[in-house]
Amino acid sequence: MFFKWNIIFLIVQLYSQLEIVVNGKSIDLEDLLAEQKRQNELISRLPPKSSHLQRVSFRQEDPYYRRGKKLFFMPDDYDKRRLPPRVKEGEVNKIHVSIDIYGIPLLDEKLEEIMLELKISHMWADLRLNTSEMKRPLELEPTSISDFWTPDSYFHHVKASNEVKIMTPVASLRVRPDKIIQYTKIILVTLGCPMSFYNYPMDNQICRLELQSFGYDMNLINYTWMRPPQMKKDIIIDNHDVEIADYTFEYSPEGIRFSGLGIRIELKRHLGFHITQSYIPSIIFVAIAWMSFHVPSDVVPGRMVLSVTTLLTLISMFNSVRSLTPQVSYMKALDLWVFCVCLVFVFSSLAEYGFVLYLTSRSGWQKKVDADIRTISGSDRLVNPANFLRLISGGMIQRTQKNYSTANMNGVVSKVMPKTKERVAYSIEYIIKIIYPLAFFGFNYTYWTYYLSRYSNKLDPS
């Protein structure tokens, strides 16, 4: 017995003197135990976990969060393929929807489409959920939406739809104690928007965003607005003002009624761009064409160059503006202004001058008559044709009276009557100077009165 206690005493002595070698250095076991105790004291002084960490811990460790593969509030016989039971007998399930427009990244008038950044939220009741243990709304991972029944909503006339995400899709899923499920996400939608450009650029366009169920008719579910749709106030679209309004509709293909929700997006174009780039320059060109009427008709090079240059410049400007406008088969208001009116006014000045040149150009027999008159009357005298000259066939001239009157030239135009064609040309030149601006002013009054009245009118909300 005594021998046994001696052995135990010897072991304790050896243990107390035991050293541990770590990385080539000897560490006393007692020092190691003291260091471990000091670290435990430091850990005990740390602050409690944040609420975020607690929520993560709840999601991952709470035994009531999941049971096997189902959420804890889901019954074992829950079938996500089946429509939830009705909240009240005789009433269909209601799907409450809210849609907010966060931005309009793209408006393509040539392709007639618009891109919208939407925050869309669906909210519905599912009485099959067992939420008796739930004391507050429960935030779930958005991917858990695949465990629930969801409405089969879709948008009309959508060309493309994409989720907004940084690392994961931007979405949220919430289950409330009253068995209400709310799912919210942000998406980018490219929407087809049929447009009419008859009044372009004084046009208003309407795009419609319509949401409905694909397979559940009005006897099963009914869509209703959770609240009116909203649009961020800082949304800016070049050359357009934007207004939105909500409405509901019924869609009845093959006699089956579906309920739906819609947003009417009204786009009202600004006139500033086309006023400065199209209307004012074309008015200036028409004014230049009118000024050409004040250039004497015998100054052929100057007047012809002015008219031709104005016409070619206006055509070039029209082609540049047309390349920026939607390409349609019918005539727009801008086409009527530039092509059918301004070009016509400018071209008419050129055509009028050509006609005047034709009338004032002297034929061969006229030049012979002028030469005979100058020979008979002398360089400083002019014969009165009423008493002296008579035209006969063949273009010959005979003297009819011995006594003919003469008048000295003192810088005053004689009383010789201008020839018939020249008299017509002078009359045209005088009349066109007055009619030309009056006709253009009259067209402007009619054009702007008609199109501005249509531009200022509100569109039919239906």
Image: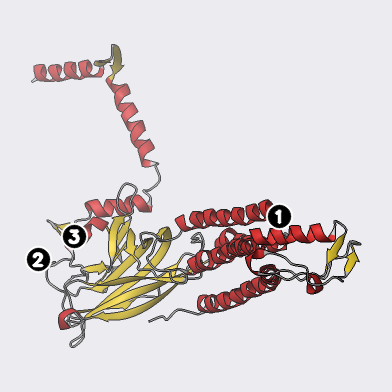
- Residue occupying the point 39% across, 42% down: 46
The circle on residue 76 is 2
Q: Is residue 362 visible?
A: no
- Residue occupying the point 78% across, 72% down: 400
Q: Mark 1 to mark 3: distance in Å?
A: 85 Å
Q: Nearer the viewer, residue 280 or 61?
A: 280
- Residue occupying the point 80% across, 58% down: 374
Q: Which x, y percent locates residue 67?
A: 14, 58
Quarter of the image where the C terminus is located: bottom left
Instruction: Tell whether label 2 touches label 3 (CB within 8 Å).
Output: no
Res 78 quadrant in image:
bottom left
Q: Mark 2 to mark 1: distance in Å?
A: 101 Å
Which residue, as the protein is rendered here, is positioned at the far bottom?
90
The circle on residue 201 is none
Please give the residue where the numbered disc 1 appears in the rendered image.
299
Q: How crowded is mark 2: few (under 14 residues within 10 Å), some or many (20 or more)?
A: few
As shown in the figure, which amino acid type bears the numbered disc 2? Asp
Please give the residue where the numbered disc 3 appears in the rendered image.
146
Q: Residues within 10 Å of mark 3 (few under 14, many from 20)?
A: few
As shown in the figure, which amino acid type bears the numbered disc 3? Ser
- Of badges 3 and 2, nearer the viewer stands 3
Q: Earlier in the sequence, mark 2 or mark 1?
A: 2
The secondary structure type at the circle numbered 2 is loop
- Of badges 1 and 3, nearer the viewer stands 1
Q: Which of marks 3 and 2 is nearer the N terminus?
A: 2
As shown in the figure, which amino acid type bears the numbered disc 1? Val
